[in-house]
Amino acid sequence: STGTTSTGNAAIITLQNGLIFGSTNMTYQTRIYIPILSMNVGDRYSAVFGFGTVTSGTITNGAYFEYSTIVSSRWIINTVANSVATTVVTNSATVVAGTFIELAIQVTGSSSVNFLINQVSVGTINTTIPTNTTEQFGLISRITKSSGTTARTIEIDYISLYLNWAAISAR
């Protein structure tokens, strides 16, 4: 829960600074439930899900989904390496409240990041993929309020990470 302050923040982050793209394929997956959409005025919040570096503030390395009504009512997909970002507003993936949503991010080594919603690709990004050892990150799920005092939540059913261990151990 964001609590009742206008800048409340709640996050789950694991493997902080423990992952880097490039050595193998990996897939992040989560299933979330958004009870109430962010308002354009009044109670506004944003949320991120995927690979990222911080529990609050700007993500400097990673690949993640973003929901921010300041930008769009649709899902936004992002990659960022060393604070340089590629951001794409999806064409058809409107954020929906009151239903479970499965988000997945498939990373192919250091060459591409594919974003899926409910097992359907909504976009691929081939630039600003963090691959240097100084561009490490973890798994992040975060909701951050930017206005209003009503507590907001996003429910998380699960978070998973798949790594191709065979490819790693063959090196």
Image (cartoon, rainbow, N blue to C red):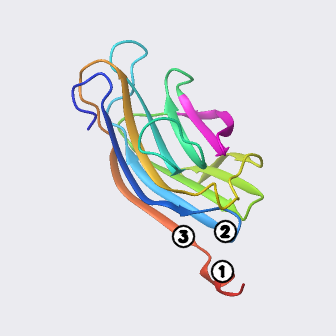
Query: 130 above or below 89?
Result: below
Taking depth in this image into account, of 161 and 82 the one nearest to the observer is 82
Q: Position of residue 19 (x, y in %)?
A: 56, 63
Residue 153 image position (x, y, % from top left) = 29, 37
Viewed as shown, does residue 164 lie left or right of 29? right
Which picture quadrant has residue 3? top left
Give the residue type that dot 2 points to. Answer: Asn
Q: Is residue 166 above or below residue 139?
A: below
Determine whether, in the image, residue 42 is placed left or right of residue 95.
left
Helix, strand or loop status at disc 1: helix
Q: Position of residue 60 (x, y in %)?
A: 59, 43
Q: How many numbered callouts?
A: 3
Q: Residues within 10 Å of mark 3 (few under 14, many from 20)?
A: few
Quadrant of the drawing holding the N terminus: top left
| Residue in the foreground of this view, choosing between 1 and 33 | 1
Q: Which residue is mark 3?
A: 162
Q: Which secondary structure class fits the magenta region best?
A: strand
> In the rendered view, would you say 45 is above or below 17?
above
Q: Which residue is mark 2?
A: 25
Residue type pointed to by label 3: Tyr
Of mark 1 and mark 3, the one earlier in the sequence is 3
Magenta extent = 74-94
| Marker disc for residue 168 | 1
Few, some or many residues within 10 Å of mark 1 (<14, 14–19, 20+): few
The residue at the point 54 percent across, 70 percent down is 162
Q: Residues within 10 Å of mark 2 (few under 14, many from 20)?
A: many
Is 51 displayed left or right of 143 in the figure?
Answer: right
- Amino acid beneath label 1: Ile
Residue sitting nearer the eye, 65 or 80: 80
Label 1 – label 2 distance at C-alpha: 9 Å
